[in-house]
Amino acid sequence: MRTYKHLFSPYKIGNVELNNRILMAPMETNMPTETGEMTHKMIKYYTERAKGGTGAIIIEFTCVERKHGFGSKNQLLLDDDSFIEGHKLLAEEIHKYGTKAFLQLHHAGRETRTSITGAQPVAPSPIPCKIMKETPKELSIEEIKELENKFITAAHRAYKAGYDGVELHAAHGYLLNNFLSPYSNKRKDQYGGSIENRARVIKNIVQGINRDVNQHFPVTVRFSVDEFVKEGLEIEESVLLAKCFEEAGAAAIHASTGIFESVDRNVEPMSFSEGWRTPLAKKIKEAVGIPVIGVGVIRDPDFADTLIEKDHVDFVAMGRSFLADAYWAQKAKEGKADSIIKCTSCCYCAERVTADLEVRCSINPVTGRESTLLPFNPLNKKLNIAVIGGGAAGMAAALNAKERGHAVTLFEASDKLGGLLDVASAGIHKEKWKWYLDYLLTRVDELNIEVHLNRKINDDDLSQMNFDEVILATGMIPKEDRILTDDSIRIINVVEAFRNKEEIRNKKVAVLGSRGAGLELSHYLAEHNNEVIAISRSGKREIGRNIDPINRRDILKHVKRLPIEFLTNTDVDKVENKKLFLTSDEKGTTSYDVDLIVSARGFQPNDPFHNKDYHRIGSCKEPRKILDAVYEGYVEISEIS
């Protein structure tokens, strides 16, 4: 059993000792009230992560000045003493489990809108963020000093609330980041120009907190050590900035990356490798004597432990990893790494909060629902439950039922469990979905769930079996594309294509459909020496539309350089004499020589059962995503228990 002795060694930030090197990174949840108050559901959300064994939790961005500083419609506020009590309740709950609590202090700067704050955004220079597209008001020196004092006063309130320290949010393009960066700071006074001047606002805040609050109350600085924009911060300057912060009295550096205009360097899509940011953190660590926190796609405890062992960083911060599994740290400590639900970087969480919705996770149905789904209700009666279908929905339901004490039998018609997870993980950069499949298989084995493979069950079979409840999780199957054809060109569906992808090489392939499955298949085939025509009935804007925005942008960026011809507002006319005939309003009827046609025009429910009393979950009701399947597998078991 791996013990991860480096990851679970104690270490200090300032004078505050943490019992391990694991931090929960700050992430927006949209759980506060619209007026910035702490809520019961937020406390439950963070408490669950404290129970899970993390060394410290850095509470999400908390606004120090409401008039201009809000970055979200539902963001914590700490610009008045009336907010202290709510924060005190949160800190007390976190401390019950031996976890330390830091609060991230924030001002949105130019990365907000008048529609959010009710006032014109402010920044060191009147340069708009290219995403928010509002020109900010340039701050006067007097206004800058007022804002410095607001950060210091907010830190004092955090101290009164019982937090162990604060973090200054100087990353991702927000106000403090605006001052640091030559990309957004064009001032000619003492707050602009040289590195020393651009660092001045943070140095003043750190020194003010040490002076006016408590010299033993640690202040960490999170900043984007590389903004990944032209004329933005790069690591060479960031090393010098980190030294400035250390000299000012900062207790640690939290090395992040990116701004709104380079969001994939902050909320990474699936294509980014584990720990890709940590070499940048290592360069900061080599230059300073205070602890350095590394962050960015850290998923595996072996990898995290190695980072500490090799002295690349002093702490690892994980955000989405704790959405996927609140008990990441505890499982690692107990040597149960295979039982960790690893974040797949599907970006569903980011998609929700960007839409002003509360945070959720596609593979952890409890995330964001801790106050309503936990704790489990007491088991009224042990039931004998049959689950039909061994995909994500079926396995999730079987696991939840078994964990609650029911007897469970899982039937799967094919020769292996997993459903369409093998297809989901087959595309380029999609292998992280296999992590979730591996987790499900591990848990099914650990809980000793009775599994019957190659067993196709029907209504008659179930009527002769003695089950108290039946859960149908038979999933979805590709829609049958009705094409007028003389069979001169082979036609297969997207599932068949992905499951036999190694056989498709050096061909000209027509892919019918360019949304999620069609775009991902086109990407894969083009990367493997095939020439691809992607044919869509809808317009160009619909290409990949049902993929989350961050991963969609990433895929579209990659396919631009590949031999893929996208034909939009186009449909199939017929297949005849080894030619594919297409019709469109723009071009009329055209023909193409292709070797293979793959239909990727959606899915349909697979529900061969007639009994309406069975519990149906996931895509056997209607085609949807893994997140729906996993959630329904959890809730359905809750309701029948």
Image (tube, rainbow, N blue to C red):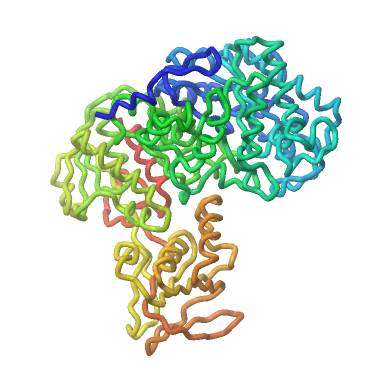
Residue pictured at 40% horizontal, 40% vertical: 363
| 247 relative to 522 in the view: left or right | right
| 243 relative to 452 in the view: left or right | right
Query: Along the line of sight, which residue is nearer the eye, 315 or 634?
Result: 315
| 182 relative to 258 in the view: left or right | right
Residue pictured at 66% horizontal, 17% vertical: 155
Quadrant holding the N terminus: top left
Taking the view exactly as shown, the residue that stands out farthest to the front is 287
Q: Is residue 453 above or below residue 383?
A: below
Q: Position of residue 252 (x, y in %)?
A: 57, 24
Q: Position of residue 626 (x, y in %)?
A: 40, 47
Residue pictured at 45% horizontal, 12% vertical: 96
Asked whether the viewer can see residue 123, the reply is no
Query: Along the line of sight, which residue is nearer the eye, 383 or 148?
Result: 148
Asked whether the viewer can see residue 630, the reply is yes
Taking the view exactly as shown, the residue that stands out farthest to the bottom is 577
Quadrant holding the C terminus: top left
Residue pictured at 29% horizontal, 47% vertical: 472
Q: Is residue 127 above or below residue 158?
A: below
Q: Quadrant of residue 191?
A: top right
Q: Position of residue 622 (x, y in %)?
A: 40, 53
